[in-house]
Image (cartoon, rainbow, N blue to C red):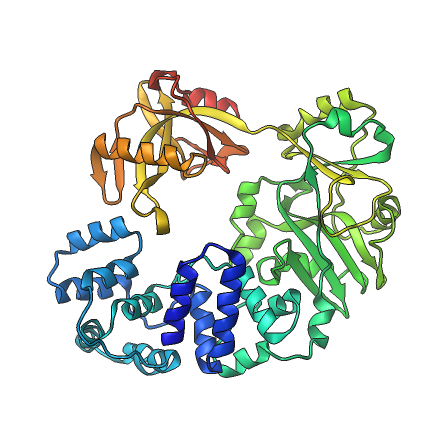
Amino acid sequence: MKNMLELLKNLDQTTSTLKKVENLKNYFEKVRPEDAAWGLYLISGEKIPTKVQRKELQEAFTEFINMPFWLFKESYYHVGDSSEAMALLRGPIKEPLDPPMLHEFIENELLTLKKLSAEERKEKFKYWWSHYDEATLFLVHKCFTGGLRMGVSKNLLIQALAQVAGVDKETMSFRLMGDFEPNTKFYNHLLVQDVTIEQISKPYPFFLASPTEKPEEEFSRWDEWAVEWKWDGIRAQLVKRNSEVYLWSRGEELINDSFPEVLSEALNLPDGTVIDGELLPYKNGKVLSFHELQTRLGRKKITRKDLDQTPITIMVYDILEWEGQDLRSRPLSERREILESITVFPKSELVSVENIDVAKSLRLESRDRGVEGFMLKRWNSTYQTGRRRGDWWKWKIDPLTIDCVLLYAQSGSGRRSNLYTDYTFAVWKDKELVPVTKAYSGLTDEELNQMDNWIKRNTIEKFGPVRSVKPHHVFEIAFEGIQESGRHKAGVALRFPRILRWRKDKKPEDADSLENVKKLL
């Protein structure tokens, strides 16, 4: 466990992604495969299948340190992480035991808990709390609760393991697809040098559009540009080679498990085809809202009900490989001509634009069409790598905004756990303030500190980690979309809400009404 504890310490002390990758790489190169497999499992955010409920562990702990459970909960809310709170509350001890190897502790201690009675499990817990130091206890607790990411995304794990194995990121992403058993056999397979099978699945690097702020200057001859609606979904590449289909997100993550209906349709494509497009909820020939797509994200198992309620397709707007030939060096006009022959999936519609005035007028229809504005691509452009300015542009619509009153506040997590940074905002319904959205980004560090001090002085009530405050401050909230929602008290849900401005010039009575908010629908 010592190597894992050293890794956690190093990860916690840096915000640099390059340093995090380096720390992960050093860990996997240093430890034995059996430890590396379990380390990968934990860092991926998984919890050990002990069948011990979190509350059982916490109640046993409060009994061990003779603390009321409500006081532990308050401590947990302040710290922001129950595993860390328990380690801190236990505090330092004299002459702690050296922790065992990670795989030994998990396999010989944690995985055997399910065979023990409640009292026997409690005795095990007490032994750990009596003999291990705070850092070890934090890791032990995280084995029960999961979520041990420490600022490490799956993409960073993929980068680190790819460097250890000496393969590319796409190959490692393919090997880490889906669930895995944390054992030596699986881990050794990750490090295999032969990439023949994985090469078949590889996508191409994505070409990204740049935002345009001066369309009048950048687009003069409109006949040189392909104009398309900018769809609001998930960018993806679909690869069909050797009768196998692979679906890749822009983050270089293989997402086959999440969208089986897309894979099934893609089997009708000829071998040697790679298309670029946007994953969208699509039913009866109509694109549904991004809210519908969110119901399918992050799901490991897709049911028949999911497929019936929210079917997904890929809206195709470019073709990168056809009949095994790389088309990226050909101009967009030629690629689009080949693309037109594909009938398996819907194709992105071309918009007829003659001048800037027509473009501005059509762009105003974006929200009614459920799109985010325009994509503009030079007809003679090749398919390049990364974000290269000049050939591909995105002209997004301006965000929607409403003025809201701060109603509730909650402390953040991690480094923000001692500040009230997560806010709930409300609008007026008759003479009552009704919560309409939450937001936690948009303020400067100085403003966050000001708000934190004000919240602590102006709290009306406490509800666990949440404080209700005097309705005094008004904020302008920006968001990308709005839809009806039966899960929210206001009856609406906002997409990507964030704080645009702290409106110190406005009073609470100047905030928007729910009636006006619903007009945005």
Q: Is residue 441 visible?
A: yes
| 213 left or right of 124 in image | right
| 176 left or right of 100 in image | right
| 337 left or right of 56 in image | right
Q: Nearer the viewer, residue 441 or 143?
A: 441
Q: Is residue 149 visible?
A: no
Residue at the location (72% across, 70% down)? 199
Q: Residue farthest to the left? A: 66
Residue at the location (64% across, 45% down)? 282
Residue at the location (78% across, 40% down)? 391
Q: Quadrant of residue 176?
A: bottom right
Q: Quadrant of the N terminus?
A: bottom left
Q: Position of residue 73 (x, y in %)?
A: 21, 52
Q: Position of residue 453 (x, y in %)?
A: 27, 34
Q: Quadrant of residue 254?
A: bottom right
Q: Position of residue 50 (x, y in %)?
A: 33, 73
Residue at the location (46% across, 54% down)? 15
Q: Is residue 521 above or below residue 191?
A: above
Q: Nearer the viewer, residue 274 or 147?
A: 147
